[in-house]
Amino acid sequence: MLSSNHFLRYKKITGKNYVERSVLKAIKNDIAIYAVHTALDNHKNGVNKIFSDALGLINTKILIPKQNFIQKLITYTIPENVEELRNALFDAGAGKIGNYEDCSFNSKGIGTYMGNEDSNPQLGERFEFVETPEIKIEVTFEKQLQSNILKALLKIMYTKKWRMRFMICKIHTKTLVWE
């Protein structure tokens, strides 16, 4: 038996790509294909592992592990903006891990900067060294949500005229297992 993450939707199978060739080979060798739609199949202890154990299968492995499926957004803002910014990110789909939602990691720190002649600082003046309390917000999300997450972040930055720093990091799927 072969279990997979997504159902294979084909009107006809011609063997034109490796997925179709795999399906044809399974059919020719009387191998059943069981397709489940969940991202938890890509983890060594995910849904397919549970199915395999229940069926008594041995020597199982993930055939095509997904790399960089989970992304992390790291952004910084002043304390007064934290709740509104976090909620905008959550509404866009960030912060969902397994059976949990609205997940984030937040840490307090001191942000420092000095604007040059082309700057327009939200706090302080050009050429003034500024130290200000900031909150670092970290949220994870599935890679396909990156566009929505960035649109939410940029929208709130633009409409509120907030100046924020942010970055996207790639995380290997195996690092996120919550029960």
Image (cartoon, rainbow, N blue to C red):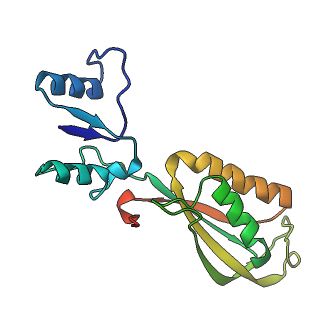
For residue 4, side relative to residue 145 (left or right)? left
Residue drawn at x 26%, y 36% is 34
For residue 6, side relative to residue 119 (left or right)? left
Q: Farthest residue toward the right?
A: 125
Between 173 and 112, which is closer to the camera in this rendering? 173
Residue 47 location, x and y as percent?
A: 31, 51
Which corner quadrant of the image does residue 35 belong to?
top left
Quarter holding the N terminus is: top left
Residue drawn at x 75%, y 66% is 84
For residue 143, side relative to residue 1 (left or right)? right
Which corner quadrant of the image does residue 17 belong to?
top left
Q: How many marks?
A: 0
Residue drawn at x 85%, y 64% is 118
Residue 126 location, x and y as percent?
A: 87, 75
Quarter holding the C terminus is: bottom left
Vertical side of 112 occupied by 145: above or below: above
Residue 171 location, x and y as percent?
A: 44, 60
Q: Farthest residue toward the front?
A: 54
Vertical side of 175 occupied by 42: above or below: above
